[in-house]
Image (cartoon, grey):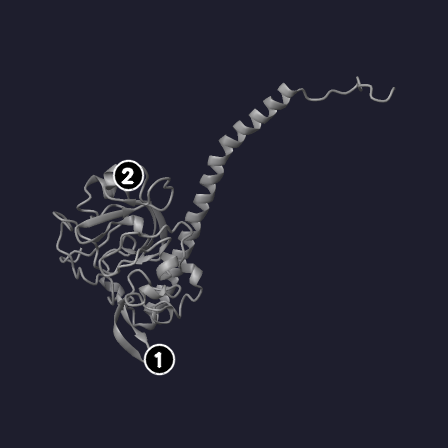
Amino acid sequence: MKPGSRNEGGKGFTLIELLVVIAIISILASMLLPSLAGAKRRARVTECINNLRQMGIGIELYSQDANGHFPPAAVQELDAQRQQTGPLRNVRRALGGNDPRPEFLDVVPSARVRPLYRYVQAPKAFRCAEDRGQPLLPCEIAPRQTPSNYDTIGCSYSYNAGSLTTIGGGGFRRAVDDPALGLSGKDQGWVPNPSLFILAHEPPARPYSCGADVRWYQWHFSQGATEISDPRAAAGRFVSPVLFVDGHVKQHDFTRALTTDPTYPYEETSDWMWYKAADGR
């Protein structure tokens, strides 16, 4: 064969064939990427569920050391001599985890005095990978809790210990037994139905407010804004992994509960209950 002559026994790609192959690969990639993204997000939900399971074990160990009682809703800080000092600091959104940023220390305590510090010592157990923070916070805290709850106060999960946000014109359809403290400090026999009673959760499970300004949050599977002023107009769902008093953990979709009647978001369903009624049920 002369140098430079074409090998008639082989066949190369023409430009058109190459473009067709690239187009096919692009189509396949566009079909696969959403599935891969969905699988990644489902894996993150699983991670958050596993964290809540560890949190549940920590609360059970705390309860055993506290004569069967649940953790308090607030604790005092410790000084250099390890003496309790100063005003009470809220742990409803920080039962364990990392130290908060300095601007949050006036309200949220340092990690060492949080109730679960001795029982779940790995701070990352209190971090949800889908944690997107809460730009609007209860009135007690001024700074914006972004980019995440974990980055600002050291914990992604909330403790269901009373002080649930009530919305003008609504709230609870039954009188609540201890609305200020809920589970806080109660013994386990106080809970009417441990398999339904919510012990801890992520913010998308319920509304938060500062005065008359109420916000709902979306973390998991949300493509748009994470802070919603009207849940009925939200494009996504309000998905939240939840820890129950009996120790089991499950992901629930709270969308229907939050959108059917947003002024009464805490009423009991076949899957959960937020509060104990004053009549004991």
Residue 155 drawn at (x, y percent) = 36, 59
Label 2 environment density (alpha carbons within 10 Å; few <14, some 14–19, many ≥20): many
Residue 228 drawn at (x, y percent) = 27, 44
Q: Residue placed farthest to the front in the image?
A: 4
Give the image quarter of residue 11.
top right
Q: Residue placed farthest to the right in the image?
A: 1
Residue 156 seen in render? no
* Residue 116 vs residue 220, the one in the foreground: 220
Q: Quadrant of the C terminus?
A: bottom left
* Residue 189 vs residue 74, the one in the foreground: 74
Residue at (45, 64) in percent of width and height: 122
Give the image quarter of residue 96.
bottom left
Residue 257 drawn at (x, y percent) = 24, 43
The amino acid sitting under disc 1 is: Arg
Residue 142 drawn at (x, y percent) = 26, 59
* Residue 106 vs residue 266, the one in the foreground: 106
Q: Mark number for residue 82? A: 1
Q: Is residue 206 left or right of residue 6?
A: left
Q: Is residue 174 left or right of residue 40?
A: left
The amino acid sitting under disc 2 is: Ala
Label 1 environment density (alpha carbons within 10 Å; few <14, some 14–19, many ≥20): few
Up/down of 229 relative to 276, above or below: above
Residue at (18, 46) in percent of width and height: 264
Residue at (47, 40) in percent of width and height: 37
| Residue on which disc 2 sits | 234
Q: Element type at marker 1?
A: loop
Residue at (86, 22) in percent of width and height: 3
Q: CA distance from mark 1 to mark 2?
A: 47 Å
